[in-house]
Image (cartoon, rainbow, N blue to C red):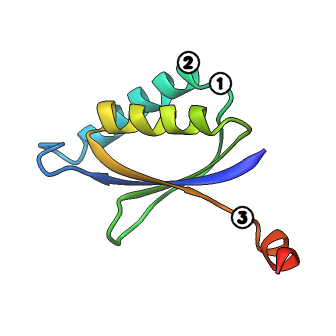
């Protein structure tokens, strides 16, 4: 399985109360589990930088990863950026 990183940034006005984020995140997670079974969530991080959430996932099908990102955009009220991640040892071995 190939690793991917999904960076998500909440859009302005997405939430009126930060406590709403938990409900929003649970709804997005359930939708992705139901519609993108080929995407395996490895880890999620809240960050204090230019993005709000960093998700690390694995999948054999990049279309499934992009579908998950589209669900995050639509239901999570986020802008996303999806990155293909190359394990460091694999990258160094290719040089």
From the viewer's side, name the closer residue of 39 and 14. 39
Instruction: Give the image location of residue 36, x and y in percent.
Output: 58, 25
- Disc on the earlier residue, 1 or 3: 1
Establish if 71 lies above or below 41. Answer: above
From the viewer's side, name the closer residue of 13 and 21. 13
Q: Mark 2 against mark 3, which lies toward the viewer?
A: 3
Does dot 2 land on a helix, a strand or a loop?
Answer: helix
The circle on residue 86 is 3
Count neighbours of disc 3 (C-alpha within 10 A) and say few if under 14, some if 14 to 19, many if 20 or more.
few
Mark 1 vs 2: CB contact within 8 A: yes
Distance from the alpha carbon under mark 1 to that under mark 2: 6 Å
Q: Quadrant location of residue 16?
A: top left
Establish if 15 lies above or below 94. Answer: above
Residue shown at the point (74%, 49%) measured from the top left: 2
The circle on residue 37 is 1
Instruction: Give the image location of residue 94, x and y in percent.
Output: 84, 74
Mark 2 vs 3: CB contact within 8 A: no
Distance from the alpha carbon under mark 1 to that under mark 3: 22 Å
* In this picture, residue 22 sits left or right of residue 82: left
Q: Quadrant location of residue 7?
A: bottom left
- Disc on the earlier residue, 2 or 3: 2
Instruction: Give the image location of residue 82, x and y in percent.
Output: 49, 52
The circle on residue 34 is 2
Distance from the alpha carbon under mark 2 to that under mark 3: 27 Å
Residue shown at the point (68%, 29%) measured from the top left: 38
Q: Quadrant of the N terminus?
A: top right
* In this picture, residue 29 sits left or right of residue 43: left
Count neighbours of disc 2 (C-alpha within 10 A) and say few if under 14, some if 14 to 19, many if 20 or more.
few
* In this picture, residue 62 sits left or right of residue 51: right
Residue shown at the point (84%, 69%) measured from the top left: 90
């Amino acid at each position: 399985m190939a690793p991917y990183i999904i960076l998500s940034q909440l859009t302005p006005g997405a939430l009126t109360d930060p406590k709403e984020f938990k409900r929003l995140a649970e709804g997005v997670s359930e939708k992705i589990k139901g519609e993108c079974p080929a995407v395996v969530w490895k880890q999620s991080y809240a960050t204090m930088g230019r993005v709000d959430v960093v998700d690390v996932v694995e999948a054999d099908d990049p279309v499934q990863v992009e579908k998950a990102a589209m669900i995050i955009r639509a239901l999570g009220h986020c802008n996303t950026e999806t990155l293909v991640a190359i394990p460091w040892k694999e990258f160094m071995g290719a040089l």
